[in-house]
Amino acid sequence: MKATEVNQKWNVLREEISKSFDMDLPDLKVMLFLIGVQELGKGPKQFSKREKEELMHIATCRLFSSMGFYELLGADEEGWPHWKLVKPVPNYTLLEQELIIKSLIIDYFQDLDFI
């Protein structure tokens, strides 16, 4: 996808998330948090700051697994998924990173038939 197409789809997705969750337009961190909660599969609840960071890490691993960078090892005794780095993620520029992550988030929500 071209950058303009990614950004257009990103804005549509943000609007849909905003409406569905009755919230302000989510930024990248909020989107990663939502994906992490979805991947954890325990539903909405209060999370500590550390757990929120872990949820965003889970989301990042899940998203980059579709590009072959991470592999799911399984869940621990509390049900939290753990991932293994399969190959190093290239050193993308910040703009490239943002565009790639947005594109992966769009794909994630399309796979869930959310958009």
Image: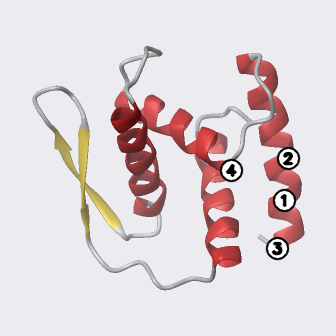
Mark 1 or 4, closer to the camera: 1
Which residue is denoted by mark 4 in the rendering?
Answer: 106
Give the labeled residue for mark 1.
7
Q: Residue at x 60, y 58 (%)?
A: 104
As drawn, is 65 to the left or to the right of 108? left
Q: Secondary structure at mark 4?
A: helix
Residue under the point 66% across and 66% down = 98
Alpha-carbon span between mark 2 and mark 3: 14 Å
Q: Label 2 to label 1, Cα distance in Å? A: 6 Å
- Mark 3 element type: loop
- Give the image quarter of residue 5: bottom right
Task: Write down the residue under mark 3.
Answer: 2
Cβ–Cβ under 8 Å for marks 2 and 1: yes
Query: Rounded to the nearest whole Å, what is the CA distance between mark 1 and mark 4?
Result: 10 Å
> Disc 4 residue type?
Ile
How far, Cα to Cα, is label 3 from label 1?
A: 9 Å
Cβ atoms at labels 4 and 2 below 8 Å apart:
no
- Badge 1 or badge 4: first in the primary sequence: 1
Name which residue type carries label 2.
Answer: Asn
Mark found first going from the N terminus, 3 or 1: 3
Q: Which residue corresponds to mark 2?
A: 11
- Amino acid marked by disc 1: Asn
When asked about the image quadrant of residue 19, the answer is top right
